Amino acid sequence: MSENQDNQTSRREFLRNAAVTVSAGVAATTLSSMPTTAHAMARIRGANDRLLIGHVGLGGQGMTHVRLLRDNANEGLKNNTESIAVCDLYVRRKKGAQNFLGLKDNQTYDDYRKLVENKDLDAVWVTTSDNWHAPVALAAMEAGKHVYIEKPMCKTLEEAFALHDTAKRTGKIVQVGSQGCSDEKWHVAGRVVKSGRIGKLVMAQGSYCRNSKGGEWNYYTIDKDAGPTSTGDGYVNWEMFRRGQGPKEWDPDRFFRWRKYWAYGTGIMGDLFPHRLHPLMIAMAQPQDGYDGFPIRVASLGGIYVQKINPETGKPDREVPDFTNIIVDFPNDCSLMLLGTVINEQGWQDMIRGNKATLYFGGSGVEIKPERVWSDEVEGGTEPVNGPGEDIAVHERNFIDSIRNNTVPNCNIDLAVRVQTMISLGEMAYRQGKTMHFDPKTRKAWG
């Protein structure tokens, strides 16, 4: 859909298309809640209008989104979307996406800044290495595009608030790719907590654990012919990729397995923790308004316990820890603990503790188990979950519906900035060996 077509959308046309289907966690649009200003109306996409999408970053996760969106464009979820532009610093990946989508050469880009200038695009999927999330997303919003950003939302605390402020100023919808937020069980838990049924919220805990013999992320394939001196499909714009960080010399391990290095990623902090932090914040019913819901203190422990040397090279295998955890304190007298490892699969049980009862997740519902001393006052039992589970396609659909209806997506910018604050403070705490403190009013961190 072009901007001209978008601007021609009238209130009368919108009213004719007002009956829409929305995904879990998003209420149906009603006449009483319809936008009335011209600016707000211009952001509405009718159910019959095709959304045109661009993709920046075409590695494993990037192509997962390309495939899912194509598969669900007209069948399955019937998203009515079309991917019309792709961008990557690695020619082979760019051409692979081009061939998969049947795009022309003028629909492929080496520079994201050229892609976001495409006036036909409605939304941009940002699926690059972590160090490029913020620059691409900021440019896309400034160019009038809605943005789906893979987790983690960005690399630094400063970037997190730049994304938040830009989304608020431009009115663009942002969804972070933590698909657990579209799992209905966390929303059910949030309603239980908000009702006061478990008493005073005390603590939440969770984990995300893996194990692999060769070392986490070492299973990412390295193309032997790729690099900045290669020609044809093997060419990589290494200088642009590294953004002035890390060694200038080409290092294929750093390019293809970038999650192991602080210059481009955040390891467990950014790859695994968002899968639990975003949903747990929903389940804890943490506020997302003003200065509320931000952490005030974050600590982190861990280290490189097993994956010290790469057996293929005999050199240090990684900079990021293979075992770590964070502890987060909130101003409303509750805490969150999260364990992450890539050297042992046994994690902590997901649960939320109140002073009167504890919530457990599993099976077909959310179980409320009263504390013994409160068992005569608190009703136990299981709250059923009658919605979708953790599914990337469902999370994409939630974002697409939010664009069409001008509603808040499940992993919206207000939730995401709070979680990214925890992740960024956690990284600082681990790397500096300090407990980090944070003031949401000044946006300052210290340790």
Image (cartoon, grey):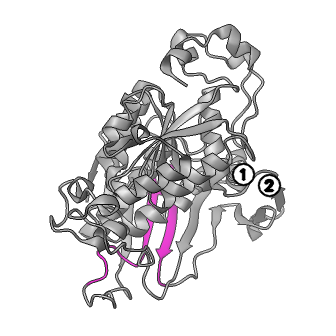
* In-front residue for pair 119/325: 119
For image coordinates 26% across by 66% down, the residue present is 227
Q: Which mark is residue 59?
A: none
Q: Position of residue 372 (x, y in %)?
A: 76, 70
Q: Amino acid at mark 2?
A: Val
Q: Which residue is mark 2?
A: 385
Q: Is residue 415 above or below residue 40?
A: below
Q: Earlier in the sequence, mark 2 or mark 1?
A: 1
Q: Residue 109, located in which quarter of the rendered image?
A: top left
Quick one: SS at disc 2? loop
For image coordinates 43% across by 29% down, the residue present is 168
Magenta stretch encompasses residue 341: yes
Residues rendered magenta in the picture: 316-343
Q: In the displayed structure, does residue 416 sit left or right of residue 442?
A: right
For label 2, the crowd category at 10 Å Cα-Cα, with few meaning under 14, some 14 to 19 and many 20 or more, is some
For image coordinates 55% across by 25% down, the residue present is 1
Q: Which mark is residue 184?
A: 1
Q: Position of residue 143 (x, y in %)?
A: 38, 28
**Residues tagged 2 and 1 counted as in contact (Cβ below 8 A):** yes
Q: Amino acid at mark 1?
A: Glu
Quick one: SS at disc 1? helix
Magenta stretch encompasses residue 217: no
Q: Is residue 335 above or below residue 10?
A: below
Q: Position of residue 308 (x, y in %)?
A: 32, 87
Instruction: Report the Cα–Cα distance between label 2 and label 1.
Output: 6 Å
Q: Residue 254, located in which quarter of the rendered image?
A: bottom left
- In the picture, the quarter occupied by the C terminus is bottom left
